[in-house]
Every structure is written in structure tokens, then in C-alpha cells.
Image: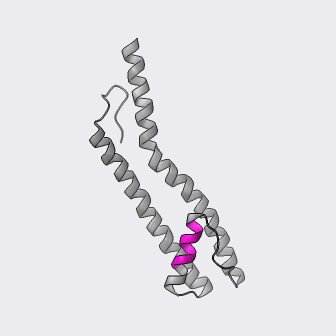
Amino acid sequence: MYEKTSDRLISRKRFARRLAKHALYVLAILACSIAAGAVGFMIFEGHGPEQAILHAAFILSGFGLVQMPESAIGKMFAGLFGLYANLFFLAAFSVIFAPIVHRILHRLHLDEEAGS
């Protein structure tokens, strides 16, 4: 997906496009995650769509629960969704920062070759 170490550094315009593409991937996964969480809260807690989306968004954002679930299965779902939210954060961070880290390492590698 990225250029090889022997290739030249890509232009800033192409790099900005690459960053935007990675951000869109994260936004798509975020939308799917909120939808999945909302469906879970509608099924297990009987919330309406607005309340379910609010609960899912709060958990994914790291704010926690809006209100404590009433049923045991709802509590289990909220706990598991919270664990998923932590994994989502790590994955999103990795996807967004991968091009940046790659560009820094690529530039360092090109600088080493030029100095040799």
C-alpha cells in the first residue's frame, strides 16, 4: 500500500489524500460501530433509536454510560461494548497515524542513504 524504501517520498498533496482516505476508513468503522451499539441497546434494553444512538456514542467516545442498564443482559452488552470501544480507539489511532509514522520513517531512511 505504501511506497518502498527505495522509492522517493510522495508529494504533500498525495500524502494529504492518503491521510484523508485513512480518516474516512475510521469514520466508516465508527458509523458501523455506533449502528451496532444502537441496535444492541434497542434489542437488549428496549431503547428507542435516539436513546440507543446516544448510549452507543457516549460509550464509544469514552464518556461512559448515560444511565445504567436495567436488565442483566443489557449490563453485559454495555460492558462488552465498552471493551470493544477501547479496542476501537486503539485501532482508529493506529489507522490514522500509520501514514504519518511511515512518512517519518521513510524520510529518515532516505536521509540515511543520502548521508552514506
Q: Residue furthest top?
A: 116
Q: Is residue 39 visible?
A: no
Residue 10 falls in which quadrant of the image?
top left
- Say if the magenta span includes residue 58: yes
Residue 71 falls in which quadrant of the image?
bottom right
Q: Is 11 located above or below residue 97 in the figure? A: above
Magenta range: 53-60
What is the quadrant of the C terminus in the image? top left
Instruction: Write the residue at 30% across / 48% down.
Output: 17
Instruction: Write the residue at 61% across / 69% down.
Output: 81
Instruction: Write the residue at 61% across / 83% down.
Output: 44
State whether the magenta stretch is mostly helix, strand or loop.
helix
Q: Position of residue 68 (x, y in %)?
A: 69, 79
Q: Position of residue 22 (x, y in %)?
A: 39, 51
Colour pattern = one colour
Q: Is 97 located above or below residue 106 in the figure? A: below
Q: Residue furthest right?
A: 72
- Say if the magenta span includes residue 70: no
Along the line of sight, which residue is nearer the eye, 113 or 1?
Answer: 113
Q: Position of residue 41 (x, y in %)?
A: 58, 80
Residue 3 falls in which quadrant of the image?
top left
Q: Is 10 located above or below residue 74 in the figure? A: above
What is the quadrant of the N terminus in the image? top left
Q: Position of residue 75 (x, y in %)?
A: 69, 77
